[in-house]
Each structure stands twice: as structure tokens, then as C-alpha cells.
Amino acid sequence: MVRVLGGRGRAATVSALLAAVVVVLTGCGAESPAGGGQAGAPLGDATSSSDVDVATAKMVAAKKASKVEECRAGSASDGGLPSIELPCLGGGDSVDLASFEGPMVINLFQGFCAPCKEEMPALQSFHETYGDEVPVIGIDVMDTVPGVALEEAISRGVTFPMYADPGGELQGGSLTARAVPTTYVLSSSGEVKLLQMGGMTSEDQVKELVEQKLGITL
């Protein structure tokens, strides 16, 4: 399953709401045209990134007490990801995503997203086993309560680096989040591919999808 993200707008009529429910239910159960899992729905308006603090004192303390890895830039000048600088969730160095090189797994999530939380252990297990070959990073997208996202990730044992995109800077590009969770992979040649939109429940499933999408053997 995926959690479909919506935006702000005027109050809808009852008929419009019913129609929206039908669209959402249809989308959540439909196969993605990209062949990467379940289809989602378009995102709504993003909040201003300046309105969201992704490194409050409480978040910084929680991260420091956890085993979450520090955010570190890669060595590439243009590894294939958008050249967008994102702050580190819970404090740390901001990083230009273009500095990262593949192969890599990029998971887009939110704190109040139940499917995101269900998927975290599988991604963490993959990171622990294959992180030296295919690193994993998380990006908390269009989230007005990043502290919840960090807390939920820590409580589920996540240690891979996590970034924040509260303003939706990634929307419209190769890392667009049509719904959460959405996971992409970056190939060694710099190609970004949709891996899966929700539903990953085990390390083996993540491994199989990564091998299929990147054409590698782990």
C-alpha cells in the first residue's frame, strides 16, 4: 500500500469527495505504469521550506542519541540525481544530491505515513547487508512535522542517512513523490529508476527489486 498525498484547496462538494475517494482507492490498488509497484496520485501544494525546522533541539538530541549515520556528500560533480541541496534531517551537513553516485537506493517517506513505517525495517535490513555496495538514503518529503519522521525512523532501527525536503524541491523532477513511500534507485551510469511505490516487506524483496532494476547481482 501507499499513502496518497494531497494538497490544500477549497472545500469540496459531497459528490467531489466521493469521486476523490474512488480515484484514491483505484490508484492505491493499480499497478504503476513504470512497473515499480502500486500507483499513487499527484501531490498537492508544498509548504514553504522556511516554515519547517528539520533540526530542532529535540531532533538533534534524538539523532545524537541514536545510531543514525551522519549526512555526507558524495564525490561526484553530477552523479545523476538533481542538483538540489537538502538539509540533513535531525541536524548535520546539507548535501547536494548531485554529489551522490550510483548504485544507490533513495526512499521518500513521511512521519505519519503508515506504509512508510511498515517498510522501514526492510530497507534497514537491506542497508545493513548490502549498504557497502548499494547505499540507502531516506528523504522526508513535504512534511510539516519532520520530528515525527525522525522519531518513527529511529524507533524502527533506521541508521541510514536521512534528508528533508519540506518545500517539495524535488517535485517535478526525477525524484518526484507521487505518493509515499516511493523508492527510487540510481544506477552507476547516473540513471534514476522507480524501484517501488510501497509494499516492500523484507530484505530479500528489496534485494530482488534492486537487482532487477539495476541489472546487478548482490
Image: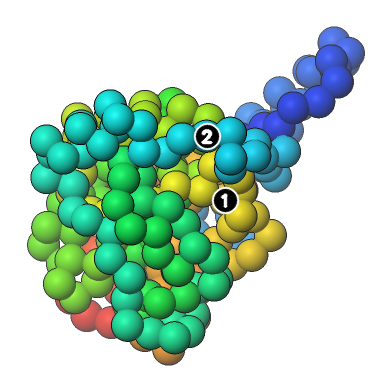
Q: Is residue 193 above or below residue 69?
A: below
Instruction: Name the residue carrying label 1.
Output: 177
Residue 25: x percent and y percent?
64, 30
Q: At label 1, which amino acid type do we have? A: Ala
Q: Residue at x 58, y 42 (%)?
A: 49
Judge left or right: residue 59 versus residue 172.
left
- The residue that appears at 55% across and 71% down in the rendered structure is 82
Q: Please tell me which residue is depicted at 11% across the width and 35% down the height of the picture.
A: 65
User: What percent of the width, then of the height, locates residue 211?
Assistant: 30, 73
Near mark 2 (Cα within 10 A), the count class, few <14, some 14-19 or many ≥20, is some
- Labels 2, 1: front one: 2
| Residue 160 placement: quadrant | bottom left
> Where on the picture, by quarter, is residue 46?
top right
Q: Where 21 falls versus 134 (above or below)?
A: above
Q: Judge whether residue 194 can be spotted in this image.
A: no
Q: Nearer the viewer, residue 192 or 161?
A: 161
